[in-house]
Image (cartoon, coloured by chain):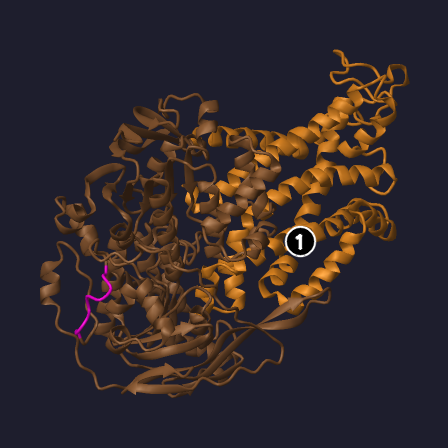
Chain colours: A brown, B orange
Amino acid sequence: MKDIVSVDHLRVEFATDGRTVVGVEDVSFTIAPGETLCVVGESGSGKSVTSLSLMRLVEFGGGTITAGSLNFERADGSTLDVAAAPSHVMGAVRGHEIGMIFQEPMTALNPVFTIERQLTDGLMLHKGLTQAAASARALELLQSVRIPEPERRLKQYPYELSGGMRQRVVIAMAMACDPKLLIADEPTTALDVTIQAEILALINRLKRENGMAVLFITHDMAVVAQMADRVVVMYRGRIVETGTVTQIFENPQEDYTKALLAAVPKLGEMKGKPAPEKMRLIGDEAARAAAAPAKARAPKVLLQVKNLTTRFPVKGGILRRTVAQVHAVEDVSFSLNVGETLALVGESGCGKSSCGRSILRLIEPTSGEVWIGGRDIRALDRTDLRRARADMQMVFQDPFASLNPYRRLKDQVAEPIQNFGLATGVELDALVLQLFDRVRLPRDFMNRYPHELSGGQRQRVAIARALAVNPKLIVADEAVSALDVSVQAQVLNLMMELQEDLGLSYLFISHDMAVVERVAHQVGVMYLGRIVEIGPRSAVFDSPQHPYTQSLLSAVPIADPRKRRFAEDLAFKPITSPIFPLGHQPAPSTYTEVTPGHFVLSL
Amino acid sequence: MKRFKTTKGMIGIVLLTLIALIAIFGPMVIPPDAATAMDMRARRAPPSLTHLFGTDQLGRDLLFRVILGTRTSLEIAVSAVLMSVILGLPLGLISGYFGKWIDNVLMRFVDTLLAFPALLLALTISAVLGPNIQNTIIAIGVAFTPYLARIIRGEALRVAQMPYVEAARSSGTTDAMIMWRHVLPNILPAVIVQATISLAFAILAEAGLSFLGLGTQPPAASWGLMIQASRDQLDIAPWTAVVPGLAVALTVLGLNMFGDVLRDILDPRSK
């Protein structure tokens, strides 16, 4: 069969600041009908530029296709070179013969139009349907993407829909005109794992039913393993390796591919191992061999949380009265030992971040106790709380937003030390220098500003800042989620190394089960503000007892093409809301101890 | 892009230096009385060799009057805007950073001021205090404060929610230090832009006050006063409006260009 797409020696340039930057160079690949081609690479690899070039949308971002051809087999059998096509032809192709799904379902829909309007616009334009016919087709589309209550959704606005439902609408829009090619640019990156599983299964089903070709852009090797027929690995705007999915995963030829695969944590690979283990990094063999096995410590409790509850008011009406409450954290209790890591996992909105912030009193809990080293944090006044902050520090998710763009890095790292008057002058400089060494940042970075650093480097600065006052507890809120896999592995290894050397305790908040399996001693699974299951890592991962933990674990994509999970379309499961009317008193959390230390919320 | 920015900056700096020089030395250089001497035989004379920019309705030389007016106009506008920044910055910063009831109290106060048109407010203050330059500055400064406070509050509100502010708080930085080190530098670009725009409006506000007899008192000259005077002779002597208008336009242009450059200089990302 003839290929739907054949890209030949594509080169895209961007003009910035009077210089020309090459976005992608010498990229060639083909996609056959009914085939899924995954383009995988880290940030800046040119994978999105490639997909935007196929739609010729790249020129709206300041790029120019300077060489190569992008041949697309049109519906009428003719071949169109997208690189040379006049713009009115492209207008007819976009959204009609090529559909596109974007990463961020929150911004891909226009907030002021109803779902119906968003769907029918394209149909009326490309297919020349009447309003009534287009509406009927829109309903059909919503049914095909399995949105519950499709008739009602048509009249709703995007803000009324959850992230998963919005992404289904975006997919319905892309599918509206029966495209021959579907481009999906990181379609599940912004979504939770269970919703990701639903969306991946949906794309697979639509592909099978319509015989479309799919160009799937992602940075996630596990998703590649689950979705791809063939894989293109990109690095710095060039293709590193191309092959079938099994070839790439089982017999990678290039070093970069090997490194990329090695850095991916695989769920289940820690089975039977008692303690957390560092990530594998290519070229780091010697360091790993030298690493001593984790020292056994006598368990000593550092952090004890008892019945922690945090509620946020929902204001409404003209008088902005509190009309309801979000039960963000509901009767949560756990303890964390010195030198250990407790991971809180769960999907967005489950209250894991609120829990971490409540412990540090960055938000005020409603009730409960938080004991750190024999002191009740909740009972402290403002001055004592400020002093107590030296014991507990935080590392944030977004390394781009957690550093002040207007301050030199050394000043930002020095700030906590100055706050507590621990050192001044030469002594302070020496301390900051040590911290930069400690997180393996070159010393000449000290005088730089955040924008000059990459994401991983910034996260190291954030860790150095957290370490500055010798804390006992570090709350890491999705600290590696925004990083590329190879960088993520390095930062995780650094964190584990610091834990070994300094006896730090981590409260590791994450949505990534595979990472958690690698780093945690204890795991707590959160759902709707409560911990539904908590216990030693091996107990929770090997024999999950709570149905939510089970569904969470089964939704995680596995980086192994021979273990495919999303062949069948999954039913849509709406998430219950954590908003309750005023005065609602939920039942206290009661737990059953399944095995020693492994507790499950009684249903 | 880089080169364009620096050329723009150079134009801005050259323009502003020139205007500043005129403001400082202008009144000393021009012949005494030249700007106030009336020549009834040459009323509304078009630009010529004797009167390069023409004359006004009383036969006064417009070139000299523009030069004389530079100092008055700039003195009032710059001082008034500076005053509104000094008043509005703490108001907006505290309001936006602390939020909650403090925000409510301060912003309701600001809203009350906003409820009156700026010029009316300035008029009232000026009328109560009496017409002279200092009081004109106070009047315009106070009248412009709520606008600046509003914009600064919005920016402070945005910055206060940034993770680096939360990071600073979690590492024990006091509120005052967070505002000084983290919030202020990040809202400064918006303040600079708003201040440069306000300057233009301040020049015109002074004109309004002068027109009503509360700002600059004749025979002193200010750009605003000149524009106001030209109002009813636009059809017969358009130059009487064009000359001071051009002075205002060039000043604002220079300020905007300079403001952009200043913002870039302060931003480490543009280096």
Where residue A458 appears, as percent x and y from the top left, is 34, 55
Q: Is residue A174 left or right of residue B236?
A: left
Task: Give the residue number, with chain letter if any, for mark 1.
Answer: B150
Query: Nearest the camera: B222 or A379?
Result: A379
Where residue A113 appears, as percent x and y from the top left, is 60, 45
Query: Nearest the camera: A2 or A542?
Result: A2
Bin the neighbour count of mark 1 within 10 Å (Cα to Cα): few under 14, some 14-19, many 20 and up. Answer: many
Q: Is residue B172 visible?
A: no
Q: Is residue B215 left or right of residue A377?
A: right
Name the quadrant containing residue A547: bottom left
Magenta stretch holds residue A377: no
Q: Is residue A160 left or right of residue A20?
A: right
Seen in the picture, residue B259 relative to A89 is either above or below; the reply is: below
Q: Is residue A512 left or right of residue B168?
A: left
Report the quarter where the N terminus of chain B lies: top left
Seen in the picture, residue A352 relative to B77 is either above or below; the reply is: below
Query: Nearest the camera: B17 or A199?
Result: A199
Seen in the picture, residue A100 relative to A387 is either above or below; the reply is: above
The magenta-colored residue range is: A265-273
Residue displayed at 70% across by 31% down? B248
Disc 1 is placed on an element classified as helix
Residue type, numbered disc 1: Arg
